[in-house]
Image (cartoon, coloured by chain):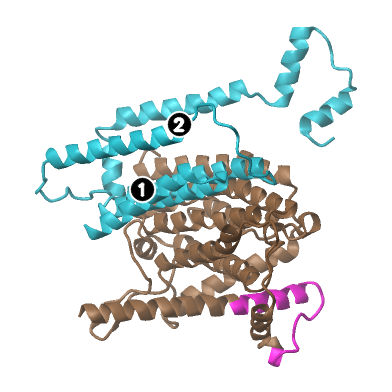
Chain colours: A brown, B cyan
Amino acid sequence: MTLLLVVILVVKIILLISILMGGFAYTTLLERRLLGFMQLRLGPNRVGRWGLLQPLADGLKMAMKEDLMPAGADKFVFRMAPVFSLFAALSVDAVVPFGAPIHLFGTTISLDIANPSIGLLIAFAFSSLGIYGIVLGGWASQNKYSLLGGIRASAQMISYELAMGLSILGVLMLAHTANLEGIVLAQKQHGWFFIPEIIPFLIYYTTAMAETNRTPFDLPEAESELVAGYHTEYSGFRFAMFYIAEYINMIAVSGLAVTLFFGGWLGPAFLPPIVWFLLKVGVSMFVFIWVRATFPRFRYDKLMSFGWKFLVPVAFVYFLGTAAFVSGVL
Amino acid sequence: MVGIIIVAILAIGASIGVVTARQPVHSALYLVGNILSLALLYLMLKAEFLAAAQVIVYAGAIMVLFLFVVTLLTAGKEERELPEDLPGQRIVAGVLSGLVGVVFAVLAIKYPGPVIKAPLPSHFGNLTGMGRLLWGPDFVYLTAIAIMLVSAALGVMVLNPPRKRRQIEAGDSEQQKSQTSPETAKKEREGTG
């Protein structure tokens, strides 16, 4: 019996990582094609039909490239930084439930790797570790541009993490649990939480964009000022790891947004739950790409004052309001 | 038990790394390793919330601020050995800390703590349990710590005022207006000059 459980766990882990890697590969293609259409051009469409084999070609190119290391670099930290980035990005997804529990081989299999009672906090703990990859990558390169990118990343991510934490507290209080499966089930009873919590959702989504360093918050890698920011000196597969981590982070924050605000796997019964979940995540990814094609980059001081003077107070006031509502004061 | 010993060795190894590492950034990294192994220890002792809080607060926020400062200050600096003020202090410190460790170990073996056989209270270590403690019997301490932290933050604001107020105060004490035109002063205040 325990052997079966171990086998199921290993299969789930392998499946999750391959889904995430596949999701990453085709998100890059989707992003390039969509950006192309939004800018009135075609995007990559030569490799395979509609460019469907483009990710494969990109992957091969990355793997074949020479692995460069700057002469003054701190070798160990330089090698470890992308690994740390990717590890943190992958681990966040371990607690996200991808679908309703299914019944197979006489046991109930929940579609997440782990289901701790404080799943939300575990997800936050891992995502807060992701920043080390960026800061250390920037520092270990011993390059001014990389260092500036890393320092910017640390300041930006700390500032926005605060607003992000405040924005999800309302959901936690409405659901009376920090267990992600419990949050989804609570939305089955009370309706999806984005209706009462629309302002925290918008704050969460904005901060999620900042946490994943996407435009308009891509100051750590601002190519017009910092060459490529923290990954200027990285090439070949180490660069690919940073790149994969960014996209998997996108998938992770989208998955969390769907779980917290949009009912997770819930949806009308004509499609299986996991399809609903993936569809919602897909919509969220589309919005990420759309925003990238639409908005210019923030100026650094505006970014900071937006985070501290607007997002944090608004999230805090809404959090107090939700607390008053839940406790019955209002 | 074996797991706890392994994690404890990891934690001690990391903390030795903190004081022996030559590079400040390496020290900071060892400290992160120490924090993570402490979180693992909490997790093994069924204190889930404490483990998550340890990682989010210490590893995710405080150590990132540390790294922010350390990377900014040590960038491009050559490693340089300064002459020691107290010759032989490292050896003495090592011997002393070893002695203290031995004393602690002897005491722990000679006077073992009571073995608690009772089952853990319900909701031990999770959000509900922590909430009931913090907002129940420990509410006074929670408020006291909150007041202390807020006053510390306010203290920083008072000791390190923004440029605008510093300029006004300097102007008041020296009874002289700045030579710059009002427009330049405004630009300087906003940092857009």
Which numbered tag is attached to residue B89? Answer: 2
Q: Chain of mark 1?
A: B
Tell me the magenta residue range: A25-50
The residue lying at 29 percent from left, 77 percent from top is A6
Q: Position of residue A84 (x, y in %)?
A: 52, 62
Q: Quadrant of residue B131?
A: top left
Q: In the displayed orientation, state which residue is furthest to the front.
A: B87
Q: Nearer the viewer, mark 2 or mark 1?
A: 2
Q: Position of residue A88 (x, y in %)?
A: 49, 62
* Residue A295 appears in the picture as rendered: yes
The residue lying at 56 percent from left, 55 percent from top is A131
Q: Position of residue A177 (x, y in %)?
A: 34, 55
Q: Mark 2 is on which residue type?
A: Gln
Q: As drawn, is B148 to the left or to the right of B184?
A: left
Q: Main secondary structure of the magenta part?
A: helix
> Who is closer to the viewer here, B73 or B23?
B23
> Who is closer to the viewer here, B15 or B185?
B15
* Secondary structure at numbered mark 2: helix
Q: Quadrant of residue A82?
A: bottom right
